[in-house]
Image: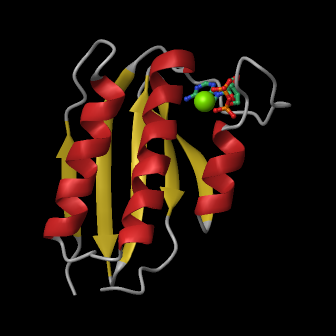
Amino acid sequence: MSALVAHLDVPPGPGGTTAARTAARTVLQAWGFRDADWLYDATVVVSELVANAVRHGGGILALTLHAVRGRVTVIAADCTGAPPRRRRGDQTGGRGLAIIETLSRAWGVQPYGRGKCVWVLLPACDGR
Ligand SMILES: Nc1ncnc2c1ncn2[C@@H]1O[C@H](COP(=O)(O)OP(=O)(O)O)[C@@H](O)[C@H]1O
Ligand SMILES: [Mg+2]
């Protein structure tokens, strides 16, 4: 089976994360991923990845969804080489990576130009 790939532009500004989340949900539904809980979790991962790229990564360059044999990877490219690092949660946040780890099978970082890509492999979707 060939891979399905979607490149989503993330608008700059405060609405970017919500726009990315909505667009990702629409694409995944169009690809046949219909389980409501899985879709919800996938959009949470997208939100946390995009928020981190914007807040810590110097801005998001590209958001990519990749599906092959029913397995979806979400990839966010940003502008800095510094990798995500778990930190203790407090009133300022610090739970995004923990949430991503809970909702994913695996995640990692790859160099991308002068920055990096953070990729997250989602669990298989039962409702597909
Ligand atoms: N894309 C990124 N680029 C650089 N650093 C990151 C990135 N994502 C996360 N981090 C680092 O990892 C830490 C933990 O991320 P996270 O758990 O989402 O907490 P929060 O975003 O609330 O600080 C961040 O505080 C930041 O130092
Ligand atoms: Mg975060």
Q: How is the image coloured?
A: secondary structure
Residue lying furthest left:
30
Q: Quadrant of ligand 1?
A: top right
Residue 3, compared with residue 9, is above or below; it is below
Q: Position of residue 54 (x, y in %)?
A: 45, 20
Q: Position of residue 28 (x, y in %)?
A: 24, 64
Question: Taking 67 as reference, is 50 left or right?
Answer: right
Residue 4, compared with residue 52, is above or below; it is below
Residue lying furthest right:
88
Which sits in the foreground, 55 or 75? 55
Q: Position of residue 65 (x, y in %)?
A: 30, 55
Which sits in the foreground, 109 or 106? 106
Question: Taking 117 as reference, is 14 left or right?
Answer: left
Which sits in the foreground, 14 or 110? 14
Q: Position of residue 112 (x, y in %)?
A: 44, 34
Q: How many marks?
A: 0
Q: Residue at x 65, y 31 (%)?
A: 83
Residue 109, compared with residue 93, is above or below; it is below
Which sits in the foreground, 14 or 5? 14
**Screen quadrant of the N terminus:** bottom left
Q: Residue at x 18, y 72 (%)?
A: 31
**Screen quadrant of the C terminus:** bottom left
Q: Residue at x 29, y 24 (%)?
A: 16
Q: Residue at x 34, y 14 (%)?
A: 14
Quadrant hosting residue 13:
top left
